[in-house]
Amino acid sequence: MQRILGTSVAVLLGLAMMAGAVQAGEELADVSLDNEINHYLEQASPKWEDPSTLRAYWKQGLNFATGDKAFTLKVGGRVMWDNAWVSSDDYPSDDTGDRQFFRRIRFYMEGSIHKNTIYKLQVDFASPEVGDNDEDTGKLSVALKDAFIGWKNLPGGITFLVGHFKEFFSLEEMTSSKYITFMERSAPTNAFAPSRNTGWAVNGNAVEKRLYWGIGIWRTASDDAIIDIDGNYSITGRVTGLIVKTDEQLVHLGIGFQFRGDDRVRYRARWGPGAGPRFVDTGSFDVKDVYTLGVEAVWVWKALSIQAEYFYNSNSREGANDAVFSGWYIYVSYFITGESRPYKDTSATMSRVKPGNNFWDGEGGSGAWEIAFRVDSIDLTDDDIAGGEQMTYTVGANWYMNPNTRVMFNYVFGQQDPNDDGAKADLQAFMIRWQIDF
């Protein structure tokens, strides 16, 4: 009996050992197989650092880049839909009727090739069509905005650009329409800032990006085209400095200039909405050359900011006195939700607002709320040119639902002296803009 019991125990122990060996072997086989698969995937999967790898990612828009970032591409656009309710006792209803329109519908592509070659192409599908009398027809047309190539990181950190792009002049003009505080730029900025033309330019930063400079030669094209057979040349430049730069405060000062060898010019500006008549207008007149000077300043302290610019414009004429015009604006803004206006030191402009809490992001966010007030003035009357004077007061509120979406509310009260009938005139408008960009 004892012999049988002992034999049974030995058999059971042997079977248990065999089962354990088989299980261990299976586990070893599994581990080996897993390692083999992981090793294969690791070798087969492309590395982000690999120059031949192209990765797509989101950073305020759709971006593509190779592992070494030698080739990059960003695809984006913006849509701005405006509604304006206008009233005036001094102008006919045809000039002051309510209106709704797409202020901007743009698509663009920009990026870099072989690290230092850069490019940008931007097209607007909501540009006002200009008629034979150089007035808006009320229709929309396609317009080429930016179309340039360039080279960055040249000796001294210089960037060289050629093509169609903004002349380096005016903080408000150089700041993208995606980031401006009010629905429209001020009247003097619209009248005197040259905006986009074709040319060659260089710009750069110094002193740890606290000093910005840019200068170029542009060929002045007509308002409705970037192709001009006999355009005149201009030399335009801008220099700015960050006098104070801390985590809570910045002080920006700058100066811009433009010299134009021109033969015929015209200055005009709207009073409020981005579509409709311009009630201050010099009409076209002959000149020998034009000098324009701009001075700009910004102070940002936490949620509070103040921005201002002054423009001086002198037109030399053959057989007549120089015609001198001027304009200025000043505005204050405040974020009641605590954000601060951001600054882009590489271009010395204001940048994208990022709310502390996005609207309805799953955690009950309210977005960012900003209130602002602006006064701007322009004088286009001198000697025998009676372009008129205009003073505009704008109250604004901006709701930044997230970094790419905002709703803008503006109330504008404008005064012209004189109007077409030689008398003072008042206008007022309430405007709303729905905006998204990517």
Image: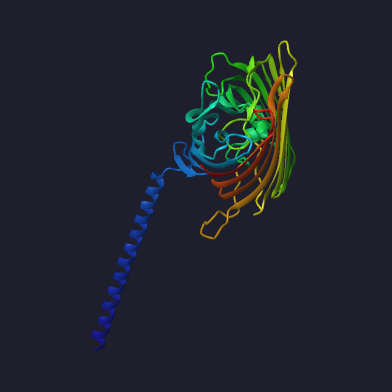
Residue visible at 60% across and 20% down in the picture: 220
Question: Is the residue 375 above or below the residue 35 in the image?
Answer: above
Residue visible at 62% across and 37% down in the picture: 272
Residue visible at 55% across and 29% down in the picture: 116
Q: Is residue 400 left or right of residue 124?
A: right
Closer-to-camera residue (45/256): 256
Screen quadrant of the N terminus: bottom left
Residue 203: quarter of image:
top right
Residue 77 is situated, as x and y percent measured from the top left of the image, at 49, 38
Residue 241 in sight: no
Residue 416 is situated, as x and y percent measured from the top left of the image, at 68, 33
Residue 348 is situated, as x and y percent measured from the top left of the image, at 67, 35
- Scheme by which the image is coloured: rainbow
Q: Is residue 87 left or right of residue 143?
A: right
Residue 294: quarter of image:
top right
* Residue with the most extreme bottom position: 1
Residue 140 is situated, as x and y percent measured from the top left of the image, at 48, 31
Q: Is residue 253 left or right of residue 193?
A: right
